[in-house]
C-alpha cells in the first residue's frame, strides 16, 4: 500500500471519528524521546503521591512499544466535555458542592470506550489483518505528550493539554496499531509568559511551569488519595468535593471553548447541597452515582470530601448532621467530621465529640479528636 492510499484511508478514518463524536484526531509514532526521562524524573521527585500504578507501568509509559508489540502508529482522539460555563464565582457559594465539569454526568470511560470500539472496527476494515489496542485513560501511556506529537494540542503549564481555538475541556483517548501511518504535525507550545494557572492554584500544586506535584493537587486529594486528607490542604479545598477546575477556568485559551451538545456529558440537575450530601446512605450513593465517575471514590471518599467542604462552609446548620455522622460505620468519614465540627463550632463542640467518641478505637479518628482538643486547649469539656 503506497503513501497516497494510506492518506486516503486515514482521511476516511478521520471523517468516521468525527461522526462518532470525536472532535480531534491525529497520528503519531510510538516514540517519546526526552519526555520519558522527564516522567522518570517526576516519579523520582515523588510527585505521583500514592498513585502506585504510575510506577508499575513506568517503563511502558516511557516506551509505547512495550504496550503493543510491533506498534508503529498511535491514533489520538479528543472529545469535548464542556457542558456548562464556569467561572471562579463558584467558590463564593460555600454551601453548594463543586464537582469538576467532566464528572457531572456519565463516566467518560463508559461513553468513549464503545466509540473507540467502533473506530477500531473501522480501522480493521481499512487495514485488514492489522493489530490494535484501545485506551481511554486506562493504560500505561503518556497520553498528553503523545497527543501533542499528534497535533491535538500542547501540554500547558498546568500539565493539561491545550488547543488553540478550543481550550482544554476535553478527554483524550488512543488506539495503537501495527500499521505505519502518515504522521500529524506536532503542536507548538503557546503558553508564552502566562502563569494564570500557576497563580490561581489553591494549594500551589504547580511547583514549576509544566510540573505538577500531585500530593498537593485538589483533584488528587479528593479523588486519588484514599486515606486522610492532610490538614494543611483542607481549608484550601473549599467547597470542592470531586476534582478542581481552577487552572482551566482561568486559562485564557479556554475563552474559546464551546459547549458540547453531547447528551452523555450534560450536567445532571441533582442537588449539590452539602448538607444533603453528608446524609446519604450507601443505598442512596449507589443509586445516585451509578454510571458516574464519582462512584470510583465510593461513599467513604465522597463523604470525607463533603465533611471537609462543610467545615469550610461557615454554615452552623451543618453542625447537627455532622454530629450524626460521628455514628457512621466508616472511620474515614468520622475523622473528617470531627475536623469539620471543630471548624464550625470551635471548643463548644468538644463535650459532644468526646461523648460521641468515648469508645473510639480507630487511630485516624482519635488523632483528629486530639488535634481539636489541643487546638481549643480543652475547650469547655
Image: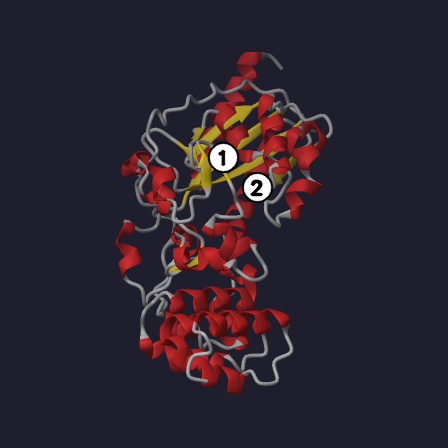
Marks 2/1: CA distance?
A: 9 Å
Query: Of label 2 and label 1, which has the lower sequence position?
Result: 2
Q: Nearer the viewer, residue 68 or 57?
A: 57
Q: Nearer the viewer, residue 45 or 350?
A: 350
Which residue bears the numbered disc 1? 211
User: How has the structure been colored for display?
Assistant: secondary structure
Is residue 294 visible in the rendered structure shown here?
yes
State whether residue 180 is above or below residue 68. Answer: above
Instruction: Classify residue 324 as left or right of residue 225.
Output: left
Query: Foreground: 136 or 243?
Result: 243
Q: Position of residue 304 (x, y in %)?
A: 50, 67
Q: Position of residue 322 (x, y in %)?
A: 44, 78
Does the residue at mark 2 contact the one at mark 1 (Cβ under 8 Å)?
yes
SS of the residue under disc 2: loop
Disc marking residue 47: 2
Q: Quadrant of residue 170?
A: top left
Q: Is residue 135 left or right of residue 305?
A: right
Label 2 environment density (alpha carbons within 10 Å; few <14, some 14–19, many ≥20)? some
Which residue lies at the image location 64% right of the left edge and 34% below the top edge?
A: 61
Q: Nearer the viewer, residue 374 or 285?
A: 374
234 over 183 or under it: above or below: below
Residue drawn at x 60%, y 37% as measured from the top left: 45
Residue 292 visible to the viewer: no
Q: Is residue 19 above or below residue 239?
A: above
Residue at horizontal 31%, vertical 34%? 253
**Quarter of the image holding residue 162?**
top left
Answer with left or right where residue 28 lies relative to residue 103.
right
Amino acid at each position: 500500500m503506497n503513501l497516497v492510499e494510506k492518506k486516503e484511508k486515514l482521511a476516511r478514518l478521520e471523517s468516521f471519528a468525527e461522526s462518532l463524536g470525536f472532535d480531534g484526531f491525529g497520528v503519531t509514532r510510538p516514540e517519546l524521546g526526552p519526555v520519558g526521562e522527564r516522567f522518570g524524573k517526576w516519579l523520582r521527585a515523588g510527585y505521583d503521591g500514592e498513585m502506585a500504578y504510575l510506577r508499575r507501568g513506568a517503563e511502558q509509559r516511557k516506551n509505547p512499544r512495550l504496550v503493543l508489540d510491533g506498534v508503529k502508529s498511535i491514533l489520538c482522539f479528543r472529545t469535548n466535555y464542556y457542558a456548562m460555563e464556569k467561572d471562579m464565582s463558584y467558590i463564593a457559594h460555600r454551601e453548594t458542592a463543586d464537582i469538576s465539569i467532566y464528572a457531572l454526568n456519565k463516566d467518560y470511560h463508559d461513553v468513549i470506550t464503545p466509540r473507540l470500539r467502533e473506530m477500531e472496527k473501522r480501522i480493521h476494515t481499512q487495514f485488514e489483518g492489522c493489530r490494535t489496542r484501545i485506551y481511554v485513560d486506562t493504560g500505561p501511556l503518556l497520553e498528553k505528550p503523545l497527543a501533542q506529537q499528534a497535533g491535538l494540542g500542547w501540554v500547558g503549564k498546568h500539565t493539561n493539554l491545550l488547543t488553540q481555538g478550543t481550550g482544554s475541556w476535553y478527554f483524550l483517548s488512543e488506539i495503537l496499531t501495527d500499521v505505519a501511518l502518515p504522521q500529524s504535525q506536532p503542536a507548538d507550545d503557546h503558553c508564552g509568559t502566562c502563569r494564570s494557572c500557576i497563580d490561581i492554584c489553591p494549594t500551589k500544586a504547580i511547583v514549576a511551569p509544566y510540573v505538577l506535584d500531585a500530593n498537593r493537587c485538589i483533584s488528587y486529594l479528593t479523588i486519588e488519595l484514599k486515606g486522610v486528607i492532610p490538614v494543611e490542604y483542607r481549608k484550601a479545598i473549599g467547597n470542592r468535593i470531586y476534582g478542581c477546575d481552577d487552572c482551566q477556568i482561568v486559562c485564557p485559551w479556554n475563552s474559546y471553548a464551546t459547549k458540547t451538545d453531547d447528551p452523555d456529558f450534560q450536567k445532571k440537575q441533582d442537588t449539590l447541597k452539602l448538607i444533603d450530601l453528608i446524609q446519604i446512605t450507601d443505598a442512596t450513593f449507589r443509586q445516585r452515582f451509578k454510571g458516574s465517575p464519582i462512584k470510583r471514590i465510593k461513599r467513604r471518599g465522597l463523604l470525607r470530601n463533603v465533611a471537609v467542604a462543610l467545615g469550610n462552609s461557615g454554615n452552623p446548620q451543618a453542625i447537627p448532621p455532622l454530629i450524626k455522622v460521628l455514628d457512621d460505620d466508616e472511620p474515614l468519614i468520622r475523622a473528617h467530621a470531627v475536623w469539620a465540627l471543630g471548624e464550625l463550632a470551635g471548643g463548644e463542640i468538644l463535650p459532644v465529640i468526646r461523648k460521641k467518641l468515648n469508645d473510639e478505637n480507630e487511630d485516624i479518628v482519635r488523632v483528629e479528636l486530639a488535634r481539636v482538643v489541643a487546638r481549643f486547649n480543652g475547650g469547655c469539656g
